[in-house]
Amino acid sequence: MTKDSGCFLCGPLTDRGGFVAVGSGIGVTGDLAPIQNGHALLFHEEHYLSFSRVPDASMVVVKEACHTLSEYWGNRSRTSIFFEHGPLGGSGNFVGCCDHAHIHSLPVSDELVASEGEVAHAISRRLHEEVGKGNVRSVDQISVDDLSNLKDIEYFWFSVDLNTLLVFELLKPERQFMRRITSQILGVETYRTWDMVDFSSAAQTTEIAKSLF
Ligand SMILES: [Zn+2]
Ligand SMILES: [Zn+2]
């Protein structure tokens, strides 16, 4: 197993109640700095830089796990969105999210957006504005099974179902870019991990994941 001693996702994650293994080396745990309650991370138990470097076979399990989370939150009037905010190389830049393959699963409450179409549309529109500003470049939509094509660029993607991904390349690298965009669209005041730490919410999310898998 490849592990990095300085990486929190390589650790036992005890600060948020551990994690649950869902198969094929994939784990689910609560995000310690939830943008919304229920904010979870799907990660590979080995220290891959990003999912573009994880063997393809694992993505079946990732998709199934995302579907399970979507269904759980959908039954509670929450719309799930998913994003991976790509590899920004070098743990020397560590501020919050880490250089370890993980996907954010974020259930958005109905008070914030009326429908899945609406939140997806708002995020998509916002990302295309960033294209206009020259901060990001739009990459052809690809399947989650084809992420290996992206392994050499500073990519990030956004999806509501993991069947269709909106993929972009960061031209002006910014840590936690998708956390910022998503928080702003949801009207959440901050997005930085260190401003949003909520141990009890994260532990609750981990408990929910443990009950589902
Ligand atoms: Zn790691
Ligand atoms: Zn992250």
Image (cartoon, rainbow, N blue to C red):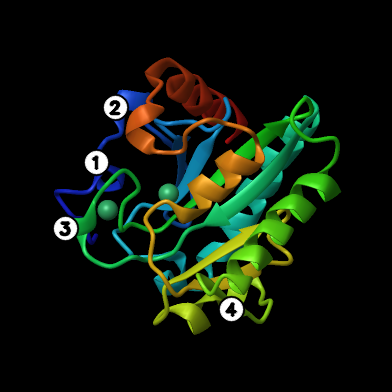
Judge: label 2 CB < 8 Å from ligand 1.
no
Task: Measure the C-alpha gap from mark 1 to mark 4.
Answer: 28 Å
Mark 2 surroundings within 10 Å by alpha-carbon count, few (fewer than 14), some (14 through 19), many (20 or more): few
Viewer-nearest of labels 3 and 1? Answer: 3
Q: Which residue is mark 3?
A: 92
Which residue is painted at 51% across and 58% down in the image?
84
Task: Measure the C-alpha gap from mark 3 to mark 2.
Answer: 24 Å
Q: Is residue 1 left or right of residue 175?
A: left
Q: Which residue is mark 2?
A: 14
Earlier sequence position, callout 3 versus callout 4: 3
Q: Are marks 2 and 1 in contact (CB under 8 Å)?
A: yes
What type is the residue that disc 1 sits on? Gly
Q: Is residue 40 visible?
A: yes
Give coordinates of residue 97: x percent, y percent: 35, 47
Q: Which residue is mark 1?
A: 11
Residue 174 sits above or below residue 75 on the image: below
**Element marked by disc 1:** loop
Earlier sequence position, callout 1 versus callout 4: 1
